Amino acid sequence: MSEVNFLYLAALTRDVDDAGSSDQLNITINVNGIDVAVVEFVAEHAEAQGYLQHAVAVVSFDSESLTNSSVRIGNRGDDAWAPQDILLFAVTDGGGIIPIAMETDLTHWLSSDPSEGRLTLPLRLVERGDSSTLIHRLLLLVRTADEDDAGTDSPVRLQVIGSDGQLRMSELITNTQTDTPQDDLEQGVSNWYYLPVRTPFMEREISIPGSVGRIELEILGRDAWLPESLFLFGLDTPVGRPTKLVPLVSRRIWQSGVLSQDEKEGNPKVFF
């Protein structure tokens, strides 16, 4: 039996005309014909943008009883929404992460108006990977704080170093990237990034006590950045929908301060 305190909904809206919506979304989790959770999420799903919001939901359910039709997402209004990727995961009171359901490369629209799309959509279950799951790419979910000067125009680099000292991945995130139309790392904005790895690795390869294995997040400029929350998952497939997610970093509430190369403003690098 799993008891969770927060449900997180992450998504990436498609980059097509009118894909965004101002309507509330709702998640329903059904176990053996009984709705154990009906949770609403605030509207903020703009065209070609990421979404990361949480809802306080003290819910108990047996994850073994869930099926691929147990979890559904719906749109509360008739302002149709076109999601591309969706992830639902839970955070326990102790900070543990439980991936629940995920869909990628969606083509359906969601709307309470049947002429515009479906009212609800099932989300298939996704497993929680363990320390021996082979990770082929990463999913970074991050929300920048909604306060003055929290966003940045400086590049941010994420690196994974194995216990042997070798780079497993190194990727830059900038607001000049040509492969994402998102408002990257801007104030009050959520972002969804798939990041490639150089060499597939397992979580245990970077978590050996006393080794140099680590995950680094570094800002490469003096334009300070303040995240609000950040989650990093390892995915077991190089493309398409993963079947397992490995939680690597969980910062439901960011407590590592401002990132900046200007040491008067903050620290240039954070280690996980």
Image (spheres, rainbow, N blue to C red):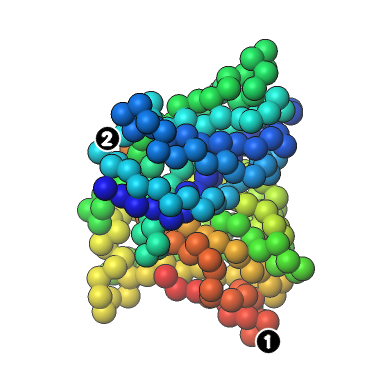
Quadrant of residue 33 within the rendered picture: top left
Disc 1, disc 2: CB below 8 Å? no
User: Is residue 189 rendered to the left or right of residue 202?
Assistant: right
Residue 155 lies, in percent from the top left, at 63, 63
Residue 37 lies, in percent from the top left, at 44, 40
Quadrant of residue 13 within the rendered picture: top right
The kind of secondary structure element at disc 2 is helix
Q: Quadrant of the C terminus?
A: bottom left
First in sequence: mark 1 vs mark 2: 2
Could you tell me which residue is drawn at 61 percent across and 74 percent down? 259
User: Is residue 194 rendered to the left or right of residue 228?
Assistant: left
Could you tell me which residue is drawn at 64 percent across and 85 percent down? 263
Residue 264 image label = 1
The kind of secondary structure element at disc 1 is loop
| Residue 177 seen in this snapshot | yes
Residue 59 image label = none
How far is disc 1 from disc 2 in space, using C-alphas?
Answer: 52 Å
| Residue 152 seen in this snapshot | no
Q: Nearer the viewer, mark 1 or mark 2?
A: 2
Residue 65 image label = 2
Could you tell me which residue is drawn at 58 percent across and 22 percent down? 119
Name the residue at the bottom extreme. Answer: 264
